[in-house]
Amino acid sequence: MSVNQLIHEKSPYLLQHAHNPVDWYPWSEAAFQKARDEDKPIFLSIGYATCHWCHVMERESFEDEAAAALLNETFVCIKVDREERPDIDAVYMAACQMLSGKGGWPLTILMTSEKRPFFAGTYIPRESRLGHAGLTALCRHVRKMWLSDRSRILDSAGMVTGRLGQAFVFTADEPVALPALNHAALQMEKSFDEQNGGFNPPPKFPTPHRLLFLMRHHYLTGNRKSLDMVAKTLAAMRRGGVWDHVGFGFHRYSTDARWIVPHFEKMLYDQAFLAIAYLEAAQLTGDAAFSRTAEEVFTYVLRDMTADGGGFYAAEDADSEGEEGRFYVWTTAELASILGPDAADIWGKVLSFSADGNFAEEATGRRSGANIPHLTRSMASWAEILEVDEAAMTARWEDIRLKMFAHREKRIHPLKDDKILADWNGLMIAALATGARILGKPEYAKAAEKAVRFIEAYMTTPEGRLLHRYRNGEAGIAAQADDYAFLIWGLLALYRTTFDPGHLEWGLRLQKQMLDDFWDAHNGGFFLTAETEKDLPVRPRELYDGAVPSANSVSLTNLTLLFRLTGNVRWAECADLLSRAFAGSVKANPSAFTHYLLGMAMLIRPGRDVVVVGGDDASTREMLAVLDDAYSPHETVLYKSRENAVRLKGVAEFTKPLDMVDGRATAYVCSDGACNWPITDPRLLKKGARRGASDV
């Protein structure tokens, strides 16, 4: 079997295409030099390993000898894994939005050897249909124009490139205030699905940072509707087919309004963000089902998505055996063979199974007999209907689930994208650290710390800079702003849980490096790429909070926390510049920047800064436990002991004179620029823990 230049790559996505008859190259100077030498334009295809329509386009066109011959004759072909090179994806996705008004993956770009785009699209069928040009027709048309009317192509490429930089320009203004947060909440309320939870018509994405913002809005204002939208959405997602009831974890999104039929891929970042959303919702509402969901997300990640060394894998595919969702669906006959007919009859009803299948295929509208497990009501409601105790119902379901899981494990599994990405690992570190603290499960903190050690050992250069990707024993690709911002977030969350000063120290070093390499000295904020990276026509600067938030949005919170934890005014000044650099754009459409608004909420109502001074005794543990009980998302906590006092002084000098009072664990509490008398009674500390709407 022939191979192309991708055979030497590490990305599972690129390796999937290494045996295509298309003469693929990775993004490299060699590819662009080949285009110049052969006087050809570039065919750039960007996707990722778990992308369903990327697989469709590969099977239909890139594995087809005739289509591949046309591509090779017309272009020099370059494949990019968007998860390895989010900067390339950001620039050319902006071009696609500019040229076509839409975007998505696979992303198809035609451009000159100078990297100037003149055509953009997403999935393109092999042959023309429904009035849209197919790939073969596009190749013939471009080849003809390239040879006979090239000036039109070059003029178009020049025009697009000239406008491309504007895609990364934002409007500065005075910092966002509470009215903009209210406006964002109102925008979301107008798009909220009252019947099914979630926002906008399908496809429905989880967008957990929206849910985090709504909880923060409720905390600030007391707005009950904001919290109700969160609770309804989280409960609906947990009941729906977008949740893997048998093996745990969330699928990427739902194709229908009721969260039943998912796009079956599983992404690490979704697991991280949704775990945090469920944890915070559990704190706010006291709903044990939300805590349990977070625990089950962690069960999935630690079981299936964790490398031996401690890093976390990127994703699992939607497809197996060439069919989307095949691994996850069931027939009624299969259920009966596993459970027996009587149990299958009961649990088939609970899981919404039917003989002809419980969903219609998207393409044909027919039912295939396949069933996606989902609930139309809670297990507690089913317990009432079946006249059994809720605890007994839960125990019975766990027994059934394990039998189904054991059976499913024998199937052919979807592809696991086993590359380890620094940014997504930062998110999972933050989630596990938060889970360890809120749920009182130290094993989650140990898993997070193991991932931190992995990144420090294998994904860091001798100079202290991060590397973006690790796979098969090799780290590579210069880290981008997301890697720094997300890992700093994880380290700060892990410090809050473990109080190991080493996590805070490394977070500070990374933040300094991020400022040196990515800060926009003219406009404020962070570029996506370091100043040394010169291989793109424009230097992207992002703010939109999409499937994952932007580095700028996350950094606003990071910088604010670092100032309050260390007292170093440099971080406050950077946060202030960041709060102004994008404020005009945010005010114009605040619900598009909800993670950025989390940082602004912390600036609007900071909450308490607490230093606990104590030792390894019951009174210290009680004092720290009080701080973990309440939903206090804007609160910062430092812990000083005899053992860590010197290191803590190195990052937070103001802690030097703080000592225990009368030999008892003591809390020093400051808020709104004023500090109170030291507290030695945990009840007094608890009394001031829940600060929110009453303080606005």
Image (tube, helix red, strand yellow):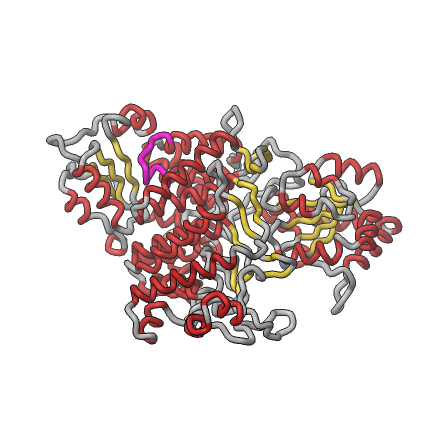
Q: Nearer the viewer, residue 457 or 157?
A: 457
**Taking 389 as reference, is 188 left or right?**
right
Q: Position of residue 177 (x, y in %)?
A: 37, 52
Q: With respect to residue 85, does 204 lie above or below?
A: below
Give the number of callouts. 0
Residue at image point 74% right, 69% down: 130
Q: Main secondary structure of the magenta part?
A: helix
Residue at image point 42% right, 65% down: 239
Q: Residue furthest left?
A: 662
Residue 200 visible in image: no
Q: Nearer the viewer, residue 280 or 539?
A: 280
Residue 85 visible in image: yes
**Taking 216 as reference, is 260 left or right?**
right
Q: Position of residue 215 (x, y in %)?
A: 35, 56
Q: Position of residue 532 (x, y in %)?
A: 60, 31
Query: For residue 496: magenta?
Result: yes
Q: Nearer the viewer, residue 631 or 601?
A: 631
Q: Residue furthest right?
A: 148
First to last magenta residue range: 494-502
**Taking 496 as reference, is 113 left or right?**
right
Query: For residue 582: magenta?
Result: no
Residue at image point 41% right, 33% down: 507
Residue at image point 75% right, 65% down: 132
